[in-house]
Amino acid sequence: MARLPGGMEHLAQAQDLLKKAKTVEELRTAQAVALPLLFNLSIEQTAQIIGRSVGATCTLRTNFCREQAGEARPKRSKRELRNRAKASLEQEAKILDEALTEAATGGVVIVPPLKPVIEAKLGKPLALSTIYAMLARHGWRKVAPDKIHPKSDPDAQEDWKKNCRGAWQKKEPDLP
């Protein structure tokens, strides 16, 4: 005989969540807790009803009960889940506004000299890729072409290009 489902002390919270659920995951979590307790369903039957595997259903039930008991922190929103973030989005925006005052009026942003300025304001070391990602997050993009090599010769480059239009025009196929 199968074990009886636990979590009867969290049934009221699960029923409240059933009424207030705004996402599919919240609804499935509440169903995973409430269905076995209200209708004596097995975990396999509950999993089939909510459209998840048995393991995922067990995890939903366990996490909900832990959150309600205060043993686990509730899930955070996607905006809060910036792992290993050096600063909040608001702090990043403020730092970039201060560091890029001349660039906002039409200047060019060069990242390597910008790196020590941002590091000084944050008080933490950063990789160049972090600064590039920060600029991208806040709407800065590359608009200027790369620098030209000092030994390049633009006239020689133009002469070298294949500029023969006649060779590249489409011809009608020869039909027999």
Image (tube, rainbow, N blue to C red):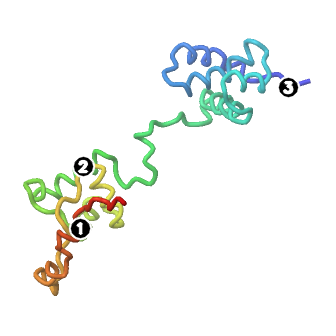
- The crowd level at tag 1 (other Cα within 10 Å; few <14, some 14-19, many 20+) is few
- Between disc 3 and disc 1, the foreground one is 1
Answer above or below: position of 73 versus 17. below
Residue 125 visible to an observer of this rendering: no
Direction from residue 84 to residue 36 in the image, left or right: right
Q: Amino acid at mark 1?
A: Trp
Q: Which residue is mark 3?
A: 3
- Which part of the image, by quadrant, shows the N terminus? top right
Indicate the position of residue 42 as horizontal and vertical percent values: 80, 22
Number of residue marks: 3
Q: Quadrant of residue 49?
A: top right
Between 164 and 55, the one nearer to me in the picture:
164
Mark sitting earlier along the chain (3/1): 3
Residue 76 appears in view: yes
Q: Is the residue 137 above or below the residue 23 in the image?
A: below
Q: Residue at x 16, y 84 (%)?
A: 152
Location of residue 65 (image quadrant):
top right
Mark in the foreground, 2 or 3: 2
What residue is disc 2 on?
A: 139
Which residue type does callout 3 highlight? Arg
Q: Residue furthest right?
A: 1
Taking the image as shown, residue 158 lies to the left or right of residue 129, namely left
Q: Are marks 1 and 2 in contact (CB under 8 Å)?
A: no
Expressed as whole percent of the image width and height from the top left, the position of residue 155 reads 10, 82
Mark 2 Cα-neighbour bin, 10 Å: few <14, some 14–19, many ≥20: few
- Residue drawn at the location 45% of the way across and 44% of the way down: 81
Please tell me whether mark 3 sits on a helix, a strand or a loop: loop
Mark closest to the chain's N terminus, 1 or 2: 2
The residue to which callout 1 is attached is 168
Q: Regarding mark 1 in the picture, which secondary structure is present there? A: helix
Most extreme residue toward the front, as rendered? 176
